[in-house]
Image (spheres, rainbow, N blue to C red):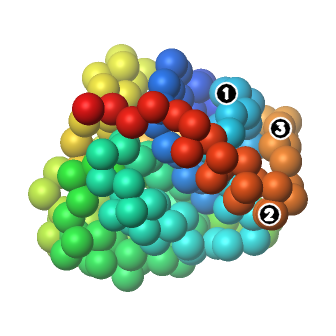
Amino acid sequence: MSAGMLDRRLVVAALLHDPGDLLVVTGLGAATYDAAAAGDRPLNFYLWGAMGGAAMVGLGLALAQPSRRVLVLTGDGEMLMGLGALATIAVQAPDNLAIAVLDNGRFGETGSQHSHTAHGADLAAIALGCGWRSVCTVSAAAELDPLRARLRREALLAVLRIAPDDPPRVLPPRDGALLHHRFRAALSRSSTPP
């Protein structure tokens, strides 16, 4: 692991610890592998082959399920691909949606080329410029527990500075129809918080 950066797998495990009825949408690649490593569950919706779409799927879910907490877990490459989503989400301003961006400064799914964030693009600053009221950047392990609590109660965009390591992949189901039906069934069975 690179000095001064967080371990991606440990970060995701910390954020998804004791998820309860949290609805989790993961972006393509590392976010999906790490969510599966933290514990595959029917309330995780993995987006295979939908790069750039995780934040907007999360927005749709948050608007359709206003009494439920939604966490989008994605990477810097995907968030860069869907920057317009940050503006749309800021305008819609759902209180029940949070986004955690795993920023390793790489396009991990295409060969680990440096992403724009490795060259100075600041996703937290971009979110503020789009109108987000609450953003943060996290680079220390001691910040993870407080961040987990914030992600479960605030409309927040959190950028997590992670090392560009590539731990072994943990693959959840890859069948889109199965994931869709499994998620819908779990959503209808799970209790809705008051």
Q: Is residue 5 above or below residue 174?
A: above
Marks 3 and 2, how far apart at CA: 17 Å
The amino acid beneath tag 2 is Gly
186 horizontally vs 102: left or right: right
Q: Position of residue 49 (x, y in %)?
A: 75, 71
The residue at the point 26 percent across, 32 percent down is 194
Q: Is residue 69 above or below residue 65?
A: above
Q: Are marks 3 and 2 in contact (CB under 8 Å)?
A: no
20 horizontally vs 41: left or right: left
The residue at the point 19 percent across, 75 percent down is 91
Tally the marks: 3
Mark before the other along the chain sequence, 1 or 2? 1
The amino acid beneath tag 1 is Ala
- Residue under circle 1? 38
The amino acid beneath tag 3 is Val
The residue at the point 50 percent across, 67 percent down is 57
Q: Nearer the viewer, residue 165 or 91?
A: 91
Q: Position of residue 98 (x, y in %)?
A: 34, 49
Q: Which mark is residue 176?
A: 2
The residue at the point 68 percent across, 54 percent down is 46
Marks 1 and 3, how far apart at CA: 9 Å
Q: Are marks 1 and 3 in contact (CB under 8 Å)?
A: no
- Residue under circle 3? 170
Q: Residues within 10 Å of mark 2 (few under 14, many from 20)?
A: some
Marks 1 and 2, how far apart at CA: 20 Å
Mark 1: secondary structure: helix
Q: Is residue 65 above or below residue 166?
A: below
